[in-house]
Image (cartoon, coloured by chain):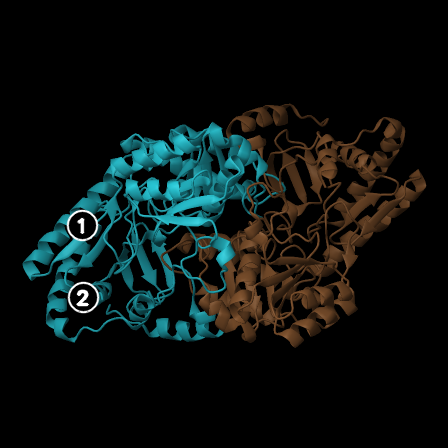
Chain colours: A brown, B cyan
Amino acid sequence: MAWTNRRAQELRERAEQVIPGGMYGHESTVLMPAEFPQFFSRGKGARLWDADENEYVDFLCAWGPNLLGYGFEPVEAAAAAQQARGDTLTGPSEIMIDLAEAFTGMVSHADWAMFCKNGTDATSMAMVTARAHTGRKTILVARGAYHGAAPWCTPRTAGILAEDRAHVVHYDYNDADSLADAFKAHEGDVAGVFATPFRHEVLADQHDALLEYALAARALCDQTGALLIVDEVRAGFRLARGSSWSALGVQPDLSTWGKCFANGYPISALLGSNVAREAAKQIFVTGSFWFSATPMAAAIETLRQIRETDYLERLVGAGRRFREGLQQQAASHGFGVRQTGPVQMPLILFDDDPDFRIGYGWVSECLKRGVYLSPYHNMFLSSAHSEADIAQTLAATDEAFEALKKRRGSLQPHPALSALMAGH
Amino acid sequence: MAWTNRRAQELRERAEQVIPGGMYGHESTVLMPAEFPQFFSRGKGARLWDADENEYVDFLCAWGPNLLGYGFEPVEAAAAAQQARGDTLTGPSEIMIDLAEAFTGMVSHADWAMFCKNGTDATSMAMVTARAHTGRKTILVARGAYHGAAPWCTPRTAGILAEDRAHVVHYDYNDADSLADAFKAHEGDVAGVFATPFRHEVLADQHDALLEYALAARALCDQTGALLIVDEVRAGFRLARGSSWSALGVQPDLSTWGKCFANGYPISALLGSNVAREAAKQIFVTGSFWFSATPMAAAIETLRQIRETDYLERLVGAGRRFREGLQQQAASHGFGVRQTGPVQMPLILFDDDPDFRIGYGWVSECLKRGVYLSPYHNMFLSSAHSEADIAQTLAATDEAFEALKKRRGSLQPHPALSALMAGH
């Protein structure tokens, strides 16, 4: 069936009436090429169908939450069994304790857990805990890093006051000197340091964390009593079966988790070591659905899958095949592409593409051939991405490179992206 | 079967190890009498079973979310059907548009909707929208009102900075002069005014909104260009099938919704009128699970139940029978009780009970007789509270009054509550 977008257009027009701008937040397609569908009808495994019933191999994975495949049966069964007993009740189920025990048992630095809903809940709780623990104000955050959409951290500043981020100070990721300078500039007042497991920003090559930087962060926190916070919301459980920095041998004091640890069910978490337990007791944080049992049941089963199956090796294997295939295709078609970050969370940018028109043109060609990619944000693979999915994907991407070559002279920059870049 | 708490004790000890303080947030029983169970095993209709399998008629209703009964079949069926298609995907389902159309069709002031997860998400988005709309800073909030647990509003201040609430200014609820004074004191800088539909604070009698106050809030906002925000998170759809202030004839510019509009499935919302649409487009807010389809399917069915059934009349009827029965019992046993607020969201306080020991003693006696009540927070009824549930409840409360009379001389104040009150 040929790719169509008739229904997509109707839906956009209806949405425009009752949702500001027709859509908002990270799943808005405002920065995607115009062809990208805004509304989807269903998902299964690594596949996604849009409202026009176009089928895609999906490399966004719900922007992270899909770790084991959409509708992954063992997780669905665990969630359904709990739902039949009760989800949102007057208190938590005892499985909240089971989940806290399982999670802290997998993340080496963690002695305790607090569950919440949004990744932003977890990062905001980490910030408040660090301030409560130290009695200090300053929070160090890497320049350009995304830690959520609350007033203290949201990347767009409409409606945000200077006071909301008065004590949020920036340093350069992977730069131990820059971090040390920030500590010096706020000597005696640093409450906590945020670090993502690797550098994953939009429209820029990704970078692994340097050991020197991670060790410096730990040492500076040890010297000053500040808390080291690793924000695992985006990367957690795609790099390792526990803390993403376990390979570096660096233990944070707090870590923040979200997106994928219940395979799409809504739950996030702040994990902490004993040093921060008293502070965590003092803060007041809550939400109407934070203690709901169904996402906890889903999380318990997802964590079991993480511990007991080869999901990670399959994820990495699929990512490697995808990356190697693309590299060959790009070279044979005469395109320079930079594939950065872990293979299981790839970002693909084109050489000599300052306004990203080549990358945008390529993902548009891929979309119409049944492959859903992002031209500006890191992508996510799931363990449901089979060899057949990758083979089908590579057949489509090869055609897309060929089509792109023919359109190269007529590609145009994306209007909303250009406006955004001009605003920087 | 006699009431027991053996398992409850074991669970508390395990929880203490892996959750700070053993539990946190609004569903913590730290301010409840010691007998109150922290963990529950299941719920159905208006009934709840704790981890020791003690059965209760539940008057907390998950602190609000249970509007139609736990496991209410039509909502469960709608959610399960959507779950099979997909919940958290790379974009929303088109039912997000259906939900926005249904919701704005029911709330007279609303032209658009944005969905989120926590009540706090909705109130924080309202604050940011009001600031983006006006370019001003000051947000007026009634003294003692609860609008969430973010740094700008959380009632406990560990880890919170003065800057987090630098421009949050308090006025007295139901006092038009106090509100006018706050406008005057911050002339030209008021971005928005928060008001709950009625005054629902802990450990204090509840009060209906005075018409004079609601009209003054509207007029002051009209005169200054500030936005009027009615926070419906707690009361929404228990007072009316649309805006809680529709009976007063006062329309807000923004309203915030949560807890019960998907009967326990996790979703909240900011609704707005056209005047605030452009500002709402500009703010950046999002969350990993905000666009998940299953809670939206549950919400669509819950809203249909709200529109098309007598849920509200049954809720009010059950609340009235409960209140009238209690009033007679209290009088016949020689206790003065004050039952305030709408019958469907009752708060029960005892006369001559400055440290609340009588109220605490009474709810303890009720608990052991299978009735779960709060001694300090407003309660919630559901439309699943049947005549039989209320009759069984009143039989238990009558015995509880009798038992209380005998224990009256030996009642003690609650230690954590006393500490909290001393801290004020």
Q: What x and y, as percent, mark residue B291?
A: 55, 42
B152 displayed left or right of A339: left
Chain of the residue under label 1: B
Task: Say which of B152 and B20 sits in front.
Answer: B152
Q: Please say if the residues under marks 1 and 2 sit with CB atoms less than 8 Å apart.
A: no
Q: Residue at x 71, y 54 (%)?
A: A143
Task: Say which of B134 and B105 sits in front.
Answer: B134
Task: Assess disc 1: are there few (<14), some (14-19) or many (≥20) residues with their C-alpha within 10 Å of its C-alpha.
Answer: many
Q: How many marks?
A: 2
Q: Residue at x 32, y 37 (%)?
A: B244
Chain of the residue under label 2: B
SS class, disc 2: helix
Q: What x and y, as percent, mark residue B181?
A: 34, 43
Q: What x and y, as percent, mark residue A84?
A: 42, 52
The reply to whether residue B341 is visible in this rendering is yes
**Which label was assigned to residue B358?**
2
Residue B25: image quadrant is: bottom left
Which image quarter is the N terminus of chain B in? bottom left
In the image, is residue B1 above or below residue B59?
A: below
Residue to which mark 1 is pinned? B322
SS class, disc 1: helix
Task: Assess disc 2: are there few (<14), some (14-19) or many (≥20) residues with their C-alpha within 10 Å of its C-alpha.
Answer: many
**Which label was assigned to residue A44?**
none
Task: Say which of A364 and A357 sits in front.
Answer: A357
Q: Earlier in the sequence, mark 1 or mark 2?
A: 1
